[in-house]
Image: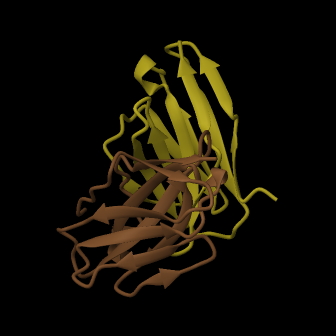
Chain colours: A yellow, B brown
């Protein structure tokens, strides 16, 4: 049973396209997150939602728009993809302080 | 968020104990000390956390200095599966559970 799942695992696309990454958690957690890990392996938080409400919104271009249709899902939509968006994107969830991470989505923008 | 300092890399032999240090001299009274690890090609994984007292769980032990300005993650018997990047992170309960990752320590386990 996968606790935090993401689709797709790999995403290769052209500059300028719009793409979405989906995340689902079956842990019953209230809070979900998106993190970005760049080519230098630095992990940075992008967004956090609690009970479908945005609570953390780091300095992220507004081309990135998270959407939480319900507590178990937090999707990430990216408009007008740029080369610099290439990275591994991790979804996570928590109830309390410990976070559970998904396997990641490797996005490559050509 | 207060900063942590860890060695870039460490090496250990299989089945030997490993002590991973972390300095956090600017820690505040409400900061919890969290450890996560990231195995190759996987997402980060929670290891352990503590506030003032030493903590043990099935994965590791956490030893916290009396002044809380440093801590040590202890893997009692390293296995090849423990090879990962280990992150020491300070988290305030009021921060909305934000995890601020540093560079971490790359642990290599030799057979």
Q: Residue at x 56, y 12 (%)?
A: A14
Residue A103 at x, y percent in the picture: 65, 45
Determine the residue located farthest toward the right in the rendered image: A1
From this viewpoint, is residue A97 visible?
A: no
Question: In the figure, is residue B27 to the left or right of A11?
Answer: left
Q: Is residue B79 positioned above or below B35 on the image?
A: above
From this viewpoint, is residue B26 visible?
A: yes
Residue A28 at x, y percent in the picture: 68, 70
Determine the residue located farthest toward the left in the rendered image: B26
Residue B11 at x, y percent in the picture: 47, 49
Q: Is residue A52 positioned above or below B60 on the image?
A: above
Q: Quadrant of residue A17?
A: top right
Query: B62 or B16: nearer the eye?
Result: B16
Q: Is residue B6 positioned above or below B64 on the image?
A: above
Q: Residue at x 73, y 63 (%)?
A: A26
**Quarter the N terminus of chain A occupies:** bottom right
Q: Is residue A100 positioned above or below B40 on the image?
A: below
* Number of dots carrying numbers: 0
Residue B96 at x, y percent in the picture: 39, 68
Determine the residue located farthest toward the bottom in the rendered image: B53
Q: Quadrant of residue A93?
A: bottom right
Q: Residue at x 36, y 55 (%)?
A: B100
Query: B34 or A38: nearer the eye?
Result: B34
Q: Residue at x 45, y 36 (%)?
A: A64
Question: In the figure, is residue B17 to the left or right of A9?
Answer: left
Query: A82 or A86: nearer the eye?
Result: A86
Query: A37 or B34: nearer the eye?
Result: B34
């Amino acid at each position: 049973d996968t606790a935090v799942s993401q689709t797709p695992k790999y995403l290769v696309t052209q500059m300028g396209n719009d793409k979405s990454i989906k995340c689902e958690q079956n842990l019953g957690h209230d809070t979900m997150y998106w993190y970005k890990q760049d080519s230098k392996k630095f992990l940075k938080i992008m967004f956090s939602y609690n009970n479908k409400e945005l609570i953390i919104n780091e300095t992220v271009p507004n081309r990135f728009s998270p959407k939480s249709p319900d507590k178990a899902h937090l999707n990430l939509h990216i408009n007008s993809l740029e080369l610099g968006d290439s990275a591994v994107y991790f979804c996570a969830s928590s109830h309390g302080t410990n976070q559970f991470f998904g396997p990641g989505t490797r996005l490559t923008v050509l | 968020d207060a900063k942590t300092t860890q060695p870039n890399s460490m090496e250990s032999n299989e089945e030997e104990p490993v002590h991973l240090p972390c300095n956090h001299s600017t820690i505040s009274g409400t900061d919890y000390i969290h450890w996560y690890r990231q195995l190759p090609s996987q997402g980060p994984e929670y290891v352990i956390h503590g506030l003032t007292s030493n903590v043990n769980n099935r994965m590791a032990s956490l030893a916290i200095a009396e002044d809380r300005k440093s801590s040590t993650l202890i893997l009692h018997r390293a296995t090849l599966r423990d090879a990962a990047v280990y992150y020491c992170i300070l988290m305030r309960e009021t921060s909305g559970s934000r995890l601020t990752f540093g560079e971490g320590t790359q642990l290599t386990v030799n057979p």
